[in-house]
């Protein structure tokens, strides 16, 4: 049973208005309106999160549709001594290591946001090769695991990469 979710935190600042209601229901979409240019993309309520990154593009810009995977996960981890979730390097480390594990470029993440409580990561990954969509979904879903040395898969590989940076992962939970 999904509650209503607020879209206002996700609407970009360079827009003229939006079709977004104050609260959104599961799978409901909205978009922005632009005083100059054309709106591209939409916001969607998906599994209790507002996903999508609409923007205003200049008139005449050539655009093409892209496929994205959106999701979130929580990391239960011990950070290196003297560092915290507010460390400016943490999002870059988390993103670059995940990109390496699933074999994409860091730039392929159109959104990668790290927040509290704990270490919460929200992401949107642009899928350039539709033939890899199913494998990306499997790999990202397999992040959800109790991390142990004997466990294989994306979660264990990601944990090993983070350990190289001093981040000792105990568990990753996906949503």
Image (tube, rainbow, N blue to C red):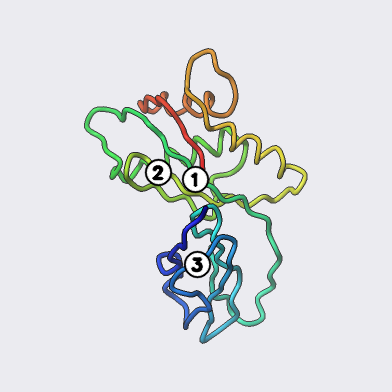
Callout 2: SS: strand
Q: Residue furthest front?
A: 1
Of labels 3 and 1, earlier in sequence is 3
Q: Is residue 80 left or right of residue 25?
A: left
Q: Position of residue 85 (x, y in %)?
A: 30, 41
Disc 1 to disc 2, how far (Cα)?
A: 7 Å
Q: Position of residue 30 (x, y in %)?
A: 56, 72
Q: Which residue is mark 3?
A: 24
Mark 3, residues whose alpha carbon is within 10 Å: few (<14), some, or many (≥20)? many
Q: Nearer the viewer, residue 55 or 9?
A: 9
Mark 1, residues whose alpha carbon is within 10 Å: few (<14), some, or many (≥20)? some
Q: Mark 2 and mark 3 in contact? Answer it, CB < 8 Å.
A: no
Vertical position of residue 125 compared to residue 27: above or below: above
Q: Position of residue 107 (x, y in %)?
A: 55, 50
Vertical position of residue 159 compared to residue 117: above or below: above
* Numbered label attached to residue 72: 1
Disc 3 to disc 1, how far (Cα)?
A: 19 Å
Vertical position of residue 27 compared to residue 133: above or below: below
Q: Is residue 120 left or right of residue 72?
A: left
Q: Nearer the viewer, residue 60 or 2?
A: 2
The residue at 58%/66% (across/down) is 28
Q: Nearer the viewer, mark 3 or mark 1?
A: 3
Q: Mark 1 and mark 2 in contact? Answer it, CB < 8 Å.
A: yes
Q: Residue furthest right?
A: 131
Vertical position of residue 137 compared to residue 19: above or below: above
Locate residue 121: give its quadrant: top left
Of labels 2 and 3, earlier in sequence is 3
Q: Is residue 78 left or right of residue 91?
A: left
The residue at 59%/61% (across/down) is 27
The residue at 60%/68% (across/down) is 41
């Amino acid at each position: 049973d999904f509650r209503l979710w607020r879209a206002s935190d996700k609407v970009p600042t360079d827009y003229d208005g939006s079709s977004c209601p104050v609260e959104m229901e599961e799978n409901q979409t909205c978009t922005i309106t632009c005083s100059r240019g054309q709106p591209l993309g939409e916001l969607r309520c998906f599994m209790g999160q507002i996903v999508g990154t609409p923007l205003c593009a200049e008139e005449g810009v050539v655009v093409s549709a892209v496929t994205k995977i959106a999701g979130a996960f929580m990391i239960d981890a011990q950070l290196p001594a003297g560092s915290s979730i507010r460390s400016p390097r943490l999002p870059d480390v988390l993103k670059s290591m995940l990109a390496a594990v699933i074999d994409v470029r860091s730039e392929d993440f159109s959104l990668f946001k790290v927040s509290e409580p704990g270490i919460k990561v929200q992401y949107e990954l642009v899928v350039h090769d539709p033939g890899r969509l199913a494998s990306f979904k499997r790999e990202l879903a397999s992040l959800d695991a109790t991390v142990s040395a004997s466990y294989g898969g994306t979660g264990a590989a990601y944990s090993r990469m983070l350990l190289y940076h001093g981040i000792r992962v105990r568990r990753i939970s996906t949503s």
